[in-house]
Image (spheres, helix red, strand yellow):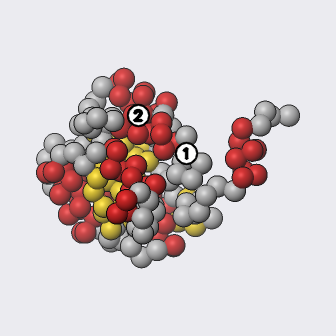
Amino acid sequence: MTTIAERTKFPQVLLIEDNHGDAILVQRAFKKAAIPGNVVVARTAEVGLSILRREGGFARGPYPDIILVDVNLPYMGGSDFLKVIKADAELKLIPVIVMSSSKAELDLQATYKGYANGFITKPFIPNEYDHVIKTIEEYWFQLNETPEVHAPVPSNAQERETSPMT
């Protein structure tokens, strides 16, 4: 087991965000971070899925070390995106953090029921993004140990997860 910072100097971040201003603020905050993340922005969940599945022009990109996704997206919403990712054996181990301007309890519950790894309310003051991203960096990159997600989950691990407890 290792932290993301122990595995790479430049963590890969997939940001699924339809608001251009929010995407820029997140990208800038990651550039200022002690461990600068390489942020790839997808404007829709569908594009995010194409990136993760290596479809089309995304065939050679690296897997992200972490995914940040908005709840309220056009077409497929963040909660539906979570359901798809967490049902995919190859992708479900990638940590997914929901970042949303929503403070609705229903959104919070829906994301955790969809196995989100965290829920963060977007700051309303632009310079507060630096603090939010620094906190994500400290916890998810430097402190929390995560499994390698660049390879599919071994088939025997999948079987153990779905077999009944004895």
Quadrant position of the N terminus in the picture = bottom right
Left or right relative to 103: residue 124: left
In the image, what residue type sits under mark 2? Asp
Q: Which residue was labeled with disc 2?
A: 80
Q: Nearer the viewer, residue 136 or 99?
A: 99
Q: Which residue was labeled with disc 1?
A: 88
Residue 138 in sight: no
Badge 1: how crowded within 10 Å, few (<14), some, or many (20+)?
A: few
Q: Looking at the picture, how far across and down is residue 89, in whole percent?
A: 59, 48
Residue ID at (36%, 23%) = 106
Left or right relative to 105: residue 147: right
Q: Nearer the viewer, residue 59 or 129?
A: 59
Q: CA distance from mark 2 to mark 1?
A: 13 Å
Residue ID at (44%, 48%) = 96
Q: Quadrant of residue 110?
A: top left
Q: Looking at the picture, how far across and down is residue 159, in whole percent?
A: 75, 44
Q: Looking at the picture, how far across and down is residue 43, in whole percent?
A: 25, 49
Q: Secondary structure at mark 1?
A: loop
92, above or below 111, in the image: below
